[in-house]
Each structure stands twice: as C-alpha cells, then as structure tokens.
Amino acid sequence: MGLPAVARMSAPRATAGGNLGTRPMSFSDFEVDEVAREAGDAARSSRRAHEIAVELEVPLYHVDALGIVWHGRYYEYLEHARIRLLRARRLDASDLLELGFGMLLVESRCRHVAPLRYGDRIRVSAWLRDTKHRLHVEYEIMNLTQGQRAARAHTILVTTDPGGRLLLRTPEAILERLAQDESPQP
C-alpha cells in the first residue's frame, strides 16, 4: 500500500514568546509528497483488473467559451470506457437484464489535473478495483496530444434485484462473468 500524498503548507511551532508561529515549507516536503504520489501510482497500477482503453478526439461542441472542455463532459468520456469494460465481460445493460439484475451508479468522482482542448486526442482507461460488494471502477484520462494525464476518476456501481432492491453483495452470476476470460466485443 502506498503512502498518502498530503499537501503540507506549514506546521505550527512554538516561538520564543510562546506564540504559535509557522514552519515554512521546505523543498524536502515536496520531495516526500512526490515519492508518496509515485508509490501510490505504482500500487494503483498493479491492481488494474480487466483494464480496457478507448481513444477519442475532443469535438468542438465539448469546448466552452474559455477554450477548454467543460468539466461535466469528462463523465461522458468515463462512461464510454465503463461501457466498453462491462461489454467485454458480457455485463452490458441487456446482459444484466437477462441475468435478472440491474445496476445503479451511486458514487462518482473526477480529479482534474490538466485541461483538455478542442482536437486533443485522449485515451480513457478503465479497470475494476473491487467487485465483492459493488463494482468499483477506476479511470485515467490521458491527453495523448500533450503527453500528460488530464484526470483520474472512479465510479461505484451497485447491483439491484429485478424489483430494484439493493443487493449487499455482487451476485455470483456477475462475479462469474468477471472471472471469465475476455469475450469478443461486439
């Protein structure tokens, strides 16, 4: 498990007069944070189960008046990758209905690192991090045009029975499909 990356601004310290002052940040604080971030990235990359990627080009209508992609569009990019990931495991919406289950998205988070612009080529990678009680899908959006990460994200999906009631564990039928070798994509 990697060390948590923490932003350190300053730490309180006592001064000669007894007042609390602050300790200025040093370059070593940034080095420790960078090492922690790299360790966390390495730990995350080792858990990329069933990773799949889609490449897209940012269309003009996704760009706002400032010339960058509006933040809500990133979720559309994530959905393209998530659908491809689930289809590869034969868990698309029609497959779930056939099995007698549904899925609900209950959590989503996107951490924007660098802006995307019109015409940028992007690669959206998606992989499963946890499947026991819910499907925890992790994402990375890479800007291939600029050669840098644009965002990291995750979504959490829960399974429901045919009546729409939440299931506390991922059903065995879904886990079996997740455990199978990749199926050909339609």
Image (cartoon, helix red, strand yellow):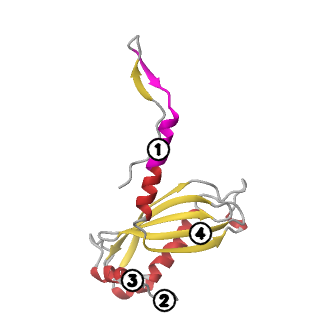
- Mark 3 or mark 4: which comes first in sequence? 3
Where does the image place residue 182, in percent across and percent down from the top left? 43, 84
Q: Residues within 10 Å of mark 4 (few under 14, many from 20)?
A: many
Image position of 53 (left or right of 67): left
Q: Quadrant of residue 103?
A: bottom left
Residue at (54%, 73%) from the top-left corner? 53
- Residue type at mark 1: give it: Asp
In this rendering, the answer to whether 175 lies above or below 16 is below
Residue identified by numbered label 3: 96
Residue identified by numbered label 1: 33
Image position of 57 (left or right of 3): right
- Mark 2 or mark 1: which comes first in sequence? 1
Q: Quadrant of residue 63?
A: bottom right
Q: Label for residue 184?
A: 2
Pair 2/1: label in front = 1
Residue at (57%, 53%) from the top-left corner? 113
Pair 3/2: label in front = 2
* Mark 2–mark 4 distance (CA, rounded to whole Å): 20 Å
